[in-house]
Image (spheres, rainbow, N blue to C red):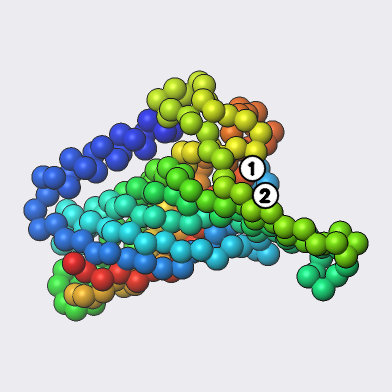
Amino acid sequence: MKLRFFVTALCLSIVVCVNAQMVTGFIRAGVNLANVTITGDGAIDDAKSLTSFQVGSIINVPITPYIAFQPGLIFTGKGTKSQSGSTNDNTYYRATSNPYYFELPANLVFKTGSSGYTRFFAGAGPYLGIGIAGKVKSDGKILGSSFNSEKNIEWSNDDPATLNYEEGAGFGIMKRFDYGLNGTAGIETRSAVISLNYGFGLAKLQSGSKSSADDKNKHRVLSFTVGIRL
């Protein structure tokens, strides 16, 4: 039901964009500080934060002089890292998981003022993402003997319309579809948009399990972006 809600919201976004007047847009890019929750109540380990990036475009649809609807398309990197020991130790282990998604945010944004060169804004809304690529890397030493590996992330071939069954599921495979909530705040001028964004994932990452016992690994992404108006 959650996934159907986000798909419906996306469809409504497209309808609004087609019929809206005074539509503008901007391209944006920035740095992601990605992480994954480690407990069922959503806690994260700051030491596992992974630096990645995002790039994409946002459409600005004015509703009133103070409110705008902003759907978009973003290519974004998520993931996490872990490390046990130091690279100077005789035994250590280090690993990163860095999946990439095409993401469709749909935010309702509130702005200060109705004209002028500078306006502050804040907003929130849902997002829907689809995993398309990524790497899992690991390296380390065992009693002085080095090892390393790198492989592509495996995705399930799940059809989001089949809510009670997940195609292509298995151990070590990530769910292809991600969804959640995002918030944004920042400052805009006539030529640029600077924003702080946060993605709060609601879909667990592991495929093939419906148990709530392992319902703890979900994406969290803090990003700093700069946009240029088109």
Pointer 1 residue: 216
Check disc 2: other Cα within 10 Å, few if <14, some if 14-19, many if 20+: some
Mark earlier in primary sequence (1, 2): 2
* Residue 191: % across, % down: 21, 75
- Pointer 1 local density, CA inside 10 Å: few below 14, some 14–19, many at least 20: many
Name the residue beneath numbered marker 2.
38
Determine whether, in the image, residue 200 is placed left or right of residue 190. Answer: right
Q: Tell me whether the residue at label 1 lies in contact with that at label 2, contact meaning CB atoms closer than 8 angstroms.
A: yes
Report whether 174 appears left or right of 72: right
How far from the left and from the top, in percent, is residue 200? 49, 51
| Residue that lies at the very extreme toward the bottom in this rendered image | 117
Question: Which kind of residue does numbered mark 1 sit on?
Answer: Lys
Q: Quadrant of the C terminus?
A: bottom left
**Residue 151 in picture, x, y percent from top left:** 61, 49
Residue at the spot 42% in from the left edge and 44% down from the top edge: 129
**Residue 44 can be seen, yes or no:** no
Number of the label disc, if any, that sits on residue 202: none
